[in-house]
Image (spheres, rainbow, N blue to C red):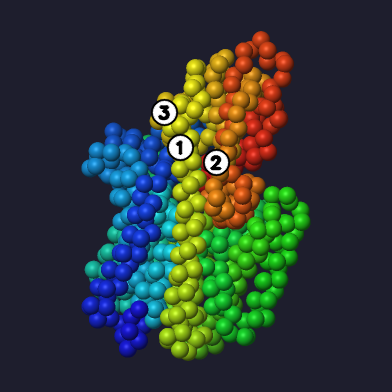
Amino acid sequence: MIPLEAGIGERAPRLVLALSLGAVLAFVLLITLPFAGQAFHIDDAIFWDFARHSQESPWQQHLADYRLMGIEIPEFRDTHPPLDELYLSAIMRVTGSDSELPLHLGFIIFPVIAGFSMLFLARRFTRNALLATMLMLATPVLMTSSHTLMGDLPMTAFWLVATTAYIYGVDRDDTRLLALAGVAAALAVFTGYQALALILLLPAYALLKQKLTWKNCLPLLLPVLGFAAYTLYSLERYGALPRFKHARGLSLGGSSVLYRIEGNLVQLGGAAVFPLFAAGAYCLKRRRWILLLPVAAGSIALSYYYYSQSSSFPAASAMLFAVFLAAAGIVVVSVSAESWVQLADALKRRRVDTDFVFLAFWLLAMMSVVMLLLPHATAKYSLPFLAPLVLLIFRELESGIRSESVVSLVAAIAVALTFMAGVAVSSADNRLAQAYKDFSMEFGERYQPEGQVWFVGEWGLRHYMEGEGYRYLTSASMEPAEGDLVVRAGLMDWPLDNSVVQRLELVDSTGVRSDDPIRVMNFAANAGLYGSHWGKLPFTFSDRPVETFDIYRVKPEQVAGEGAGGASEGGSGSVGGDDSSAGANGGAGGAT
C-alpha cells in the first residue's frame, strides 16, 4: 500500500514502488505457475491451429478445409486479430515445442503486464494501489483467463497499458507516455477487436480534464490507421471486412437483450470481485439503500422463479444466482445513480468529480457494448472493464470508511476471499480441461478399437483426439463403417446424419467424477463460465460429473431397421441423451 502522505496520484518513494512491483510479480507467479501445465482448453485449440499455420503462412488469416461444430468450412476465417496467434507461433519457433508448458509460460507475461499497469493506474485513483491490483488479479475471471492461450487477457493487458500511459501522459503533458499509449492501443486492437473502444475511451479522459488537444489525440491515429490497413488487407484478400464473430446477425429483440443483460450481470457478480464485498462497499451510505433494496429483492424473486420453473436450476444454483445478480446490480445501479448526480452538478456548474466520471464511463459504456453487441454472456467479456470496477469499489470503500487501517483490513479480507474463489474456480476449470486430455490419451488402451475411432466434440477433446489419430465426425459425414467407434462428449454435441445415427449402438457411458463440488461448465447445474448457452452462472456447486462421454459402436447397415439402441434416444439426427440438443445449439461461438 502506498503511504498516505504520498497522496493519490503522487509519486511514491522508489523503494516502495519497487517492492510493490515485486509483490505484483510474485502474486502473478502464484496464480499462474501452478497451472502452467494445464491442458489446452476451450478455444485454445483454434488459436493453436492458427499459430501452427502461421509458421508457414504468417499473413494468411484463414485455415483451409477446417471443421467447427460439425460443419466443413472450405475457408475458415479467423474471428480474432492476428497478434495473439503470431505470438504463439513465435514461442513455438523459439522453444521448438508446441506443447502446453512452454506456451503457458510464454503467456505469463500478459498477467504481469496487466498487473504492473493496474498498479500505476490504481496509484492514480486510490490510496490502496497494491491491494486494488491484487484484487483485480485474484478475480476468478482474470485468474482462469491467465491459464489459457486465448486473446482476451493479452488484449486486456495492452488495454491497461494504453489507458495508464494515456492518463499519465495527459496529466503530465508527457509526449513519450502519449506515444506509448498509442502503440499499446494499436497492439490491443490487433489482439482483440473490443479494444477499438479505446479510440473513444481515451479522448474522453482528456475531454473531462479539459485537455483535448491535437497533441493528446495524435496517439490514437496509430490504432485507427493500423486497423484501417488491416481492413484494407482483408477486403483485398477476402473481399470482406475482418470477421468479428462466428454467428451471423445479432438479435436486438427485447427478450434477447434482456437475456444478455441478465447473463452478463450474473457473470460479473460471480466471476469478478467477491460479491459480498462488491455489494457491501456500496451499502456504506444509507442514502443508497432506497435503491439497493429493490435490486436485492428483484434478484431473489427472479432466482426463485427459475428455481420453481426448471429442474436444471437446483437450490445451490438459485442461491448463487441471487447473490451474483444482486451484487452486480447493486454496483451498476449505484454507479449509474452517482453518474446522474455528477451530470446534474455539471449542468448547475458545480464541482464535478471527473475521475469518478471517467471510471464510470469506462465501466458503464463497455458493459453496454458487451450486452448489446456481443452474442451471449460469458465471464471473459468483463475483462476490459474489470479495472474500473475494482477502482470504483475501492474509491467507494475509501470514502465510506474514515479509518485507513480499517479500509486496508477490509480490502485485504476482500483480496483473500476473492483469491480463494479464484483458485477454486481455476481448479475446477483445470479439471475440466484435463478430463479431455486424459480421456483422449487413455481411450485406445481402455477400449482397444479395431476399426476407426470418430469423435463428436470441440475444445480440448478435438485437439487431443486428433493428436491420437482419431477422426472428427461432421454432421454430414456418412463415413463411419461397421465396427468403428464413435465418441460423443456431453458438453459439446451436434446432430449427425440420420443414416449414421440409426446404426449406432451405445456400448459405454462414462463420467468424470470429482470430489470437489465446484462446476464451471455443466448443463445440469446451470454453470456456464465460458458461455450462457451452458448455464446462467459462471460457477456453482454440484455433484454431477465434470464431463460425460458416450461411446457407440457402428452396426452393419443391414440391421439398421432394428433400432438404434441408446443412440436413438436423442431423437432423429441427434446422438446422446438430455444434453445433446443444448450442446448443439450452443455452438463454438459460445466460448469464443
On the rendered structure, is 81 left or right of 287?
left
Three-letter residue code for mark 2: Val
- Disc 2 or 1, which lies upstream in sequence? 1
Marking on residue 468: 3
- Disc 1 or 3, which lies upstream in sequence? 1
Residue at (43% x, 80% y) in the render: 408
Residue at (62% x, 82% y) in the render: 288
Label 2 and label 1: CA atoms lie apart by: 10 Å
Q: Position of residue 185 (x, y in %)?
A: 35, 60
SS of the residue under disc 1: helix
Residue at (27% x, 73% y) in the render: 19
- Disc 2 or 3, which lies upstream in sequence? 3
Q: Quadrant of residue 112?
A: bottom left
Q: Position of residue 227 (x, y in %)?
A: 37, 51
On the rendered structure, is 252 left or right of 124?
right
Three-letter residue code for mark 3: Glu
Decide: marks 2, 1 in contact (CB < 8 A)? yes
How crowded pointer 2 is (Cα within 10 Å; few <14, some 14-19, many 20+) is rated as some
Residue at (70% x, 74% y) in the render: 294
Q: Position of residue 146 (x, y in %)?
A: 40, 55
Judging by the rendered image, the residue that carries numbered circle 1 is 438
Three-letter residue code for mark 1: Asp
Q: Can the viewer see residue 500 in this picture?
A: yes
Q: Position of residue 455 (x, y in %)?
A: 52, 29
Judging by the rendered image, the residue that carries numbered circle 2 is 512
